[in-house]
Amino acid sequence: TGVVGEPVLEKGEWVVHTQDLSYFSRLTDHETFARLATVEMFRRGVENAGLVCAVVDGADWEQGFIDMHCPDAVRILDWAHAAEHLANVGQTVFGVGTVEASQWLGAQLHELKYGDPQRVLGKLRGMRDELMAQGGRGAVLEVVRANLEYLEKRQEQIRYREFLAAGYPIGSGIVESANKLVVEDR
C-alpha cells in the first residue's frame, strides 16, 4: 500500500507518484493470505480511506480479496497484463515478430490506453467472427476467443483513459518488483 500523490504531467504523460510504501507478504495459499491481511488492511486504514484503487493482474482470487477487504475499491487490470493478452492475439494471428503483429498491437494498445476499450474489444470480436466464418483455424481461433473472453470479463477494469485522467495508477509493477526483491530474494 502507499499514498498516491497528485498527478503530474511529465514528458506529455500524466504520472502519479506513490509515497509511504509498505508491503505485506506471506508465502501461503490465497485464502490464508486474505485472512492474514485483515489486520494489515485495518492498520493501514483502508476501511476509512476515501478512495482505494486495486491494481491487480486479473486473477479471480484477487477479486475475492478486494470484495473481502474493500468492495468499493476502483478495480484496475494491471496494464502489462492487458497488453500481454493483446500481444498474444497479435502474435498468434499475424505471426511472432512480424511487422503486421507489431503494427496491430501498437494500434490496439494506443486505443486501449488513450481511447475506447470497446473499440479494442470490437476488433477482437471481429477477428473471432472472421475466423469462425473461415472455418475456425483451430488453435488461432481458440487464442483469440480466450483472450477476448478474458478482457470482456474485465471490461470495467480496462478503462485506462478514465483511470489516467483521474490520476489513478494503472500498473502493479512496483508491487511485483518489491515482491521479487524483498520477498523472493530473501
Image (cartoon, rainbow, N blue to C red):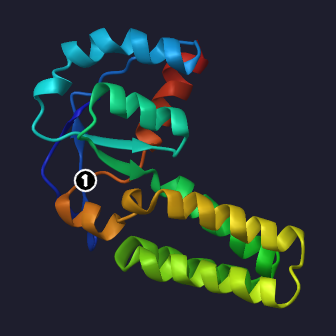
Quadrant hosting residue 113: bottom left
Quadrant hosting residue 105: bottom right
Residue closest to the eye, 163 or 99? 163
Q: With respect to residue 117, does 183 lie above or below?
A: above
Residue 92 falls left or right of residue 70: right
Q: With respect to residue 170, does 143 lie above or below?
A: below
Q: For label 1, count other residues whose C-alpha is less than 10 Å away and answer few (under 14), some (14-19) or many (20+).
A: many
- The spot of residue 3 in percent (x, y) is 18, 35
- The spot of residue 143 in percent (x, y) is 76, 66
Residue closest to the eye, 63 or 103? 63
- The spot of residue 54 in percent (x, y) is 34, 41
Q: Residue at x 28, y 36 (%)?
A: 71
- The spot of residue 166 in percent (x, y) is 18, 60
Name the quadrant of the C terminus. top right
In the rendered structure, which amino acid carries the disc numbered 1?
Tyr
Residue closest to the eye, 5 or 138? 138
Q: Residue at x 52, y 32 (%)?
A: 61
Assign a secondary structure to mark 1: loop
Residue 34 falls left or right of residue 49: right
Residue 159 falls left or right of residue 145: left
| Residue 40 visible in the shown view | yes
Say how many tags the image has.
1
Quadrant hosting residue 175: top left
Which residue matches tag 1? Answer: 168
| Residue 96 visible in the shown view | no
Q: Residue at x 31, y 51 (%)?
A: 169
Q: Residue at x 35, y 65 (%)?
A: 159
Name the quadrant of the N terminus. top left
